Each structure stands twice: as C-alpha cells, then as structure tokens.
Image (tube, helix red, strand yellow):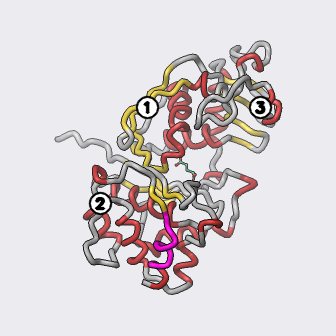
C-alpha cells in the first residue's frame, strides 16, 4: 500500500456584510484558480460573526454571485455563528494557559493611553501598563459573557507568505494584547484561527489587508498547539484615490452588473487583466479559462486601481 498525502484544503470565507464587489471577486477568483490548479479541496465558509455589520439578506446573494461568476466549491460549512463550540473551548484553553485576561476598557480608553502611533497596520495599541493585576495567571473558568484579550509575548512573529515573502511582526510593539472575545462571542482573530485549524485548512488565500492579522492568528494557533496554514495574501483592488473599494468609487457590485445584463465572462476578463493574464483581444473569459491561464508568479505585486474606464468597459464595452 502507498501512503497518500492528505488532501490540501482552502476556503472561500466571505463576510455577508454587503454584496460582493469586483475586489472581493478578484480575490475569490484567485483563490478558486489556485485550488483548482493544485487540486485543493475548496470549502465555502460564510463568516457571519461581524454582528452589527452582517446583512442577512446578503448570505444568499454571496452564494449566487460566486456561482454566477463560475466559482464553485466542494462543500459548504455551517454558518460560523451556528457552530461556536470550538471557539468556546479554545477561549477556555487560552485562559487556562494564562494567555488571556478580561478587559472592559473601551476603545477610546485604550486609545487615550497610547503613547505614540505604532505603524501603519497597527490600529490601536494596547499599552502593557493597562494590563490588570494578575494578567498572565491561569484562569480555569473564564466568564465568557465578558470581553477578553490575548496576552502577547515580546516575540517576533514571522509570517512566511507565499505571495509576499517573509514578513516579521512584533505584536507587542504594534498592537499589544489584542481582543479575542467580545460580549457577543468570539472576536474575528480567535474565530478564524480556530475555524481554520479545525476545518483542516492548509492554505489561506485572502486580501493583503489581513497580513498583519496572520501574525495574530499564528500566535494564537501556536498557543493552542495547532499548525499554521500556508498564507497567500494578495494585493487589493483600490479606487483611484488609493482607498479600499467603496460606494464613492462607483457601483462595482457583481449583483448590479448581473441585473444590468453584463456577462460573467466579461467580469472574469477584467479580473484576468488585473491578475497578470494576457487577454490579447479577448473580452470574455470563462472561470475555467481563468484557472487554466492564471499564474501566481505573474500576479502584479502592487495594488490594482479600478478606474472609471474599467466600469464603463464592463457596462458598455
Ligand atoms: N471573512 C473575512 C472577510 O471577509 C475574511 C477572513 C479571512 O479570510 O481570514 O473579511
């Protein structure tokens, strides 16, 4: 008998906080192409934990948009919010290991204590002097109705990214102890790390705005004794002002193009042009052709700018 390597697995992990736009579509298309090229199993995991921002009617729309574009998946996992037992267990484990402490400070209070800005990606840093007395002691039965932070150690976390190369993060310097539990349940960093581990995700492909999060997720996974996935952080599509795609850049929602009769192949052609594929004079590409022609080595290093010409080319040719 021959040993068979376990099948690698990746995930499409949309948050249903709005309709998918061209930037989301490009990242998902790249994830899908890598999975199909390399025979990874691909699962869909809809991440509906971002409570105030989740719009339940976009859950079905997300599935429809992906399918319309020709991106399929092998299995859909339960909605994240319906399956939180593992997150509760992980939170208890982290507290029992002395790596979490309760924190009821508001964002404003944490911000007010900050001595200086700590770099582009850091957001607000939690200063070590804010730690409550006794932080770092094991807590056997944490009260999960409250909010909790992960106790960060002064270590360098190297994220060895398949697209961006190695990046070193000093979490203690940049973000400090970061939130892992809120009064309404697991915070993003814990939820996603736990789910990737228990779902056996070997390859995480997503926008490079989440590269700093990978460092936090690695630190959590190591604490939990779980392996780190391979990371593939791809540059984002931005508006002409350099900011993340938003309404002010024009309506780039897939649902809008769909309702206006634009062919999905035309969207894929634009995504292909944005992904380093030579279109020659083609203005349609199927998802399958995209997967055949996509080469991760040819993915542009820089962010992509969506222009008004791109939008009018989709609508009017
Ligand atoms: N659901 C997250 C988002 O849409 C992505 C999380 C992840 O890929 O880790 O922003």
State the CA–CA distance, disc 3 to disc 1: 26 Å
- Compared across the picture, whether 111 is left or right of 202 comes to right
Q: Residue 185 appears in which quarter of the rendering? A: top right
On the image, numbered disc 1 is attached to which residue?
167
285 versus 205 height, above or below? below
Q: From the image, tell me which residue sits under label 3.
A: 111
Residue topped by disc 2 = 294
What secondary structure is the magenta-colored segment mainly?
helix
The quadrant of the image that shows the N terminus is top left
Q: Which residues are magenta?
A: 306-314
| Secondary element type, mark 2 | loop
**Relative vertical location of residue 113 with respect to residue 207 in this rendering, above or below:** above
Q: Position of residue 173 (x, y in %)?
A: 60, 22
Dots 2 and 1: beta carbons under 8 Å? no
Whether residue 41 is visible, yes or no, is yes
- The C terminus appears in which quarter of the rendering? bottom left
Front-most of residues 5 and 213: 213
Q: Out of 304 and 192, give the one closest to the viewer.
A: 304
Residue 307 painted magenta: yes
């Amino acid at each position: 008998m021959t040993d068979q390597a376990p099948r690698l697995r990746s995930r499409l992990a949309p948050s249903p906080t709005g309709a998918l736009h061209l930037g989301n579509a490009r990242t998902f298309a790249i994830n899908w192409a890598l999975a199909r090229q390399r025979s990874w199993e691909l699962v869909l995991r809809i991440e509906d934990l971002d409570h105030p921002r989740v719009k339940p009617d976009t859950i079905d729309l997300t599935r429809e948009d992906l399918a319309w574009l020709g991106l399929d998946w092998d299995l859909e996992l339960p909605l994240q919010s319906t399956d939180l037992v593992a997150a509760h267990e992980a939170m208890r484990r982290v507290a029992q290991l002395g790596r979490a402490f309760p924190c009821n400070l508001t964002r404003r209070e944490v911000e007010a204590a900050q001595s200086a800005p700590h770099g582009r990606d850091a957001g607000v840093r939690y200063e070590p002097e804010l730690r409550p007395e006794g932080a770092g002691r094991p807590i056997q039965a944490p009260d999960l109705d409250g909010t909790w932070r992960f106790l960060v150690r002064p270590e360098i976390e190297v994220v060895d990214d398949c697209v961006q190369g190695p990046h070193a993060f000093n979490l203690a310097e940049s973000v400090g102890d970061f939130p892992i539990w809120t009064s309404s349940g697991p915070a993003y960093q814990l939820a996603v790390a736990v789910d990737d581990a228990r779902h056996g995700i070997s390859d995480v492909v997503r926008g490079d705005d989440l590269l700093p999060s990978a460092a936090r997720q690695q630190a959590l996974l190591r604490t939990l004794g779980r392996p780190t996935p391979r990371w593939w952080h791809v540059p984002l599509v931005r508006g002409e002002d350099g900011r993340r795609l938003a309404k002010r850049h024009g309506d780039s929602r897939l649902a809008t193009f769909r309702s206006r009769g634009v062919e999905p192949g035309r969207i894929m052609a634009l995504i292909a042009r944005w992904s380093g594929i030579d279109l020659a004079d083609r203005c349609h590409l199927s998802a399958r052709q995209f997967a055949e022609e996509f080469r991760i080595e040819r993915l542009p290093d820089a962010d992509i700018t969506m222009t008004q010409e791109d939008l009018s080319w989709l609508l009017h040719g």
